[in-house]
Amino acid sequence: MTARGALSRRGFLAAAGGAAAALAAGCGTGQYVQVIGSVPRDYRRRLHVVYWHSFGGDLGVAMDKLIDEFNGAQDDIFVEGQFQGSYEATVQKLSAALIARQIPDIVVLSEVTWRKMHLADKLEPLNSYFGGDYTPDIYLDNFINEGTVKDTVWWIPFARSTPLFYFNKDVFAKAGLPETGPGNWRDLKEWAPALQEHTKYALALAGGYASWYFQGNVWQWGGRYSDGLKVTLDDEKSLEAGNWMVDLVRKDRAAYLSADSQVDFTNQVTACAMLSTGSLASVSADAKFDVGTTFLPEYDGFGCPTGGSGIGVMRDAAPERKDAAMEFIRWLSQPEKSAQWTIETGYMPVAKAAQQEKALVDKAQEDPNYQTALNQLLKTKPQDLIRPIVPSAGEMMDTALQKLYSSTDSVEAVFSRLNKRLQRKADLISENYEAQYG
């Protein structure tokens, strides 16, 4: 890296704070070794690949199943999956591992956290690993394009998701409302009193990843979070979106800030919730009622962001383990396996051909909610730049929205302060961003 590049990366990671800043300070010399793992006796002659991921619970069961199938499908590589907690916990542990120079070989990184590692020059460029029938074209364009910078692929899509609007079809039927759910936010506001005769609330608003869900609202009202790295949260349309959602909480008392909107929805505290497509399998299993899904409601227009995660290969892993890691990623990307992951979790299929797999076609016919997610995917787009690029932007925005949903502060005051804070952080990384992405 050039002197200017090194300084800009240190500046970027210093803006991120904590372990990431230390990572930047120590990114010069020294040998990286593989993080400690465990290899069963039967696999000790194989090349050992350590895979850090963020899938626990039922998602972890589905992930472990895929790993076991890969290990059983060939004789040369043993992939060890190591669960690290949430996306945020995973990237924090990865930053600490890089400082200690003991790293995994591949890591699940969210649509936000992969960029931190890319800007720190810690991800392997992947173009040279494609060949034959394995090319970037096998992936859905909007997903592979998000992980591509200047024609180089850095991040392979895997557990990709979008927000989806979930509703209790039994409650809607009791209230005499359409079984298709609301097509517009005005519909939900009008229907809220009828819904609240059968549940406490019409809509649960998630505190976690609140800024991911609200990205759709801002677009629906005709606003945006940012224009490039120019933050626009205090623009008229963004403020209108914020005030409308806050009024639904404070004035209409139809919505509320939920500590866990998925639990509240399945427990029928609320008639509706915006949840990830990645929650589809678990919601369907846990709910004791007929679950309906629909596109996110419109207002003046439609808006829905992509999200979720993909897989990055660590630049400083040993070359032979990087090759082996890509064999695993390639295997996961087969249409059959991409469809399997979708069926067992609700995450979107990332391989184009997966949507034609008989198992997924049958699942979508059996459960139309899977088809809802697939149909909505065609209308989604990547998030405005400020949230995925600026360090800690998502957490700052989540905190601001949580405050609005649970206090009496004005949207104008909260968004104005947030706009200034985000812009200061954006300005700190603008030079490095332009060098890497411009």
Image: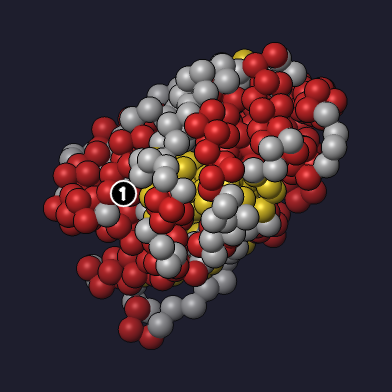
Q: Quadrant of the N terminus?
A: top right
Whether residue 119 is visible here, answered yes or no, is no
Viewer-nearest residue: 239 or 429? 239
Whether residue 175 is situated above or below residue 78 in the rendered picture: above
Rate crowding at label 1 as few (under 14), some (14 to 19) or many (20 or more) other CA atoms within 10 Å.
Answer: many
Q: Which residue is mark 1?
A: 370
Q: Is residue 153 shown above or below 37?
A: above
**Residue at 42 percent of width and 42 percent of height:** 177
Please identify the quadrant where the C terminus is shown.
top right
Q: How many marks?
A: 1
**Residue 349 image offset from top left, x and y in percent:** 31, 46
- Disc 1 marks a residue whose amino acid type is Tyr
Location of residue 261 (image quadrant): bottom right
The single residue placed furthest to the left in the displayed view is: 358
Residue 211 pos. (x, y %): 64, 37
Query: From what the image shows, is residue 315 above or below residue 331?
Result: above
Residue 160 is situated, as x and y percent measured from the top left of the image, at 42, 45
- Residue 52 % position (x, y): 51, 61
Judge by depth and name the residue closer to the eye, 192 or 76: 192
| Residue at figure coordinates x 32%, y 54% from the top left | 342
- How is the protein colored in the picture? secondary structure
Q: Horizontal placement of 75 versus 200: left or right? A: left
Q: Is residue 264 left or right of residue 354?
A: right
Q: SS of the residue at dot 1? A: helix
Q: Nearer the viewer, residue 200 or 282?
A: 200
Residue drawn at x 57%, y 34% as measured from the top left: 189
Residue 152 drawn above or below residue 53: above
Q: Is residue 204 visible?
A: yes
> Among all residues in the image, which is located at the extreme bottom?
41
Quadrant of the rendered image containing residue 294? top left
| Front one among 230 and 239 | 239
